[in-house]
Image: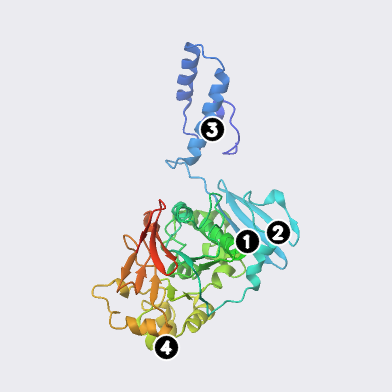
Amino acid sequence: MPEYQYLTNHEDVLSCRKCIITVDRLKILNMYLLRHDIKNRPIILTLFLILALNLSAASPSGERDTLINDGPYYFLSDDTLRVLWIENSMLRKGYLLPGVTDGTMLPADLSLSYRDLTRVYGVKPNYRQSYKGIDSIAVIADVHGNYNTFLSQLLSNGVIDKNLNWKFGKGHLVFLGDAFDRGDKVTEILWHLFKLEKQAVKNGGRVHFLLGNHELMVLAGDLRYNNEKYTKVEAITGIPYPALYSENSVLGKWLRAKPVMITINDILFVHAGVSPELIRKELKIKEVNKVFHERIVGKDIYSFTENEDLSLLSGNDGPVWYRGYFEEPSPVISSLDSILSFYGKAHIVVGHTPQKSITALFGNKVIGVDTGMGFGQSGNMLLYKNGQFFIGSITGVRSKL
């Protein structure tokens, strides 16, 4: 019998390998109900069975597998958007056509239209992303699949409302990279940022997704930190995990157009940092973003040893891997003013290197915002309002940096 079909008798319970309730326990309950002459005995037993099945589906022990939900993943083929997703460990498929929706074959929470999804295929990367006159900025980094904390932070700090929609008006939300790896809700984070991106623009705001080292790793097929859930996703879909983010997929195309460095007001944002070695090459933001888009993203980042510039950009001194700001003593102290001067900025905001809380270094010239959310910590967000920096907590408490 199918593992998840509705159960109606004790023999079905015996043959259902997902069930955690034994016949003996059912007999004990039945005897108790008879002994005490409790009415509605069949209804109580049925409810008990339903509860047992729900608990068993969520309980990972022995032979039982935790049910998996993931997706959706969209792929463009001619004018057709093919979609697949996993619902209760079962693979589901559907499609979208211009102006036509197969409503019976799409995820129940689908709220994006064909036009919303396919717009990514016509987007040209903006290599020189610079924004001025922005009064409100919120920054979050290195969430690593921890979707619940991600939502709690955005909600508590006024970026989204109770319905999880954009609430930040003309403000800018900066996601400093590393949605991938470690946690088991990567897809949920990506789609939420995808959706907020559209909502923000409609309200005069912006969402900026900057690439981190873990985006580059996954797109290049390096899955050493991937959550085991996504190994099961590969098995169910029959598709290698990196291929779910291929260039013809909506999320893959969207990610490949994202920058590595941007500036807002007098702040430079980058996932890991700008090293003195990078400045010696005098590589401007536009050039860095262009090289990443054209020659690094989706490529084997460990194969650039023969090209000095590519090796630098994709290596430990590059903008998605550098940790020099947080070393003791920091090798960047003597070069920091030169770095800021080269880009014409007063602050550099980075993630990548975990801290206990938002950390300001060198008189606020460097601000670290990776607060361990990827390792299960509640963390903090960096908030900027009218020229001042604040620390935003998961409870909504705000303190000056």
Q: What's the distance in space between the residues labelled 2 and 1, CA to CA?
A: 9 Å
Pointer 2 or 1: first along the chain: 1
Place of residue 183 in the rendered image (x, y in percent of width and height, measured from the top left): 44, 56
Instruction: Read off the residue under disc 2.
Output: 96
Judge left or right: residue 378 versus residue 30.
left
Badge 1 marks a residue whose secondary structure is: strand
Pointer 2 or 4: first along the chain: 2
**Mark in the foreground, 4 or 1:** 4
Q: Answer yes or no: do the residues labelled 2 and 3 have beta carbons within 8 Å?
A: no
Badge 4 marks a residue whose secondary structure is: loop
Pointer 4 or 1: first along the chain: 1
Q: What's the distance in space between the residues labelled 3 and 1, CA to CA?
A: 37 Å
Pointer 2 or 3: first along the chain: 3
Q: Answer yes or no: do the residues labelled 2 and 1 have beta carbons within 8 Å?
A: yes
Disc 3 residue crowd, few under 14, some 14–19, many 20+, Cα 10 Å: few
Instruction: Read off the residue under disc 1.
Output: 74
Can residue 359 be spotted in the picture?
A: yes
Pointer 3 or 1: first along the chain: 3
Q: What's the distance in space between the residues labelled 4 and 1, CA to CA?
A: 39 Å
Residue 15's disc number: 3
Instruction: Read off the residue under disc 4.
Output: 282
Q: Residue at x 55, y 72 (%)?
A: 256
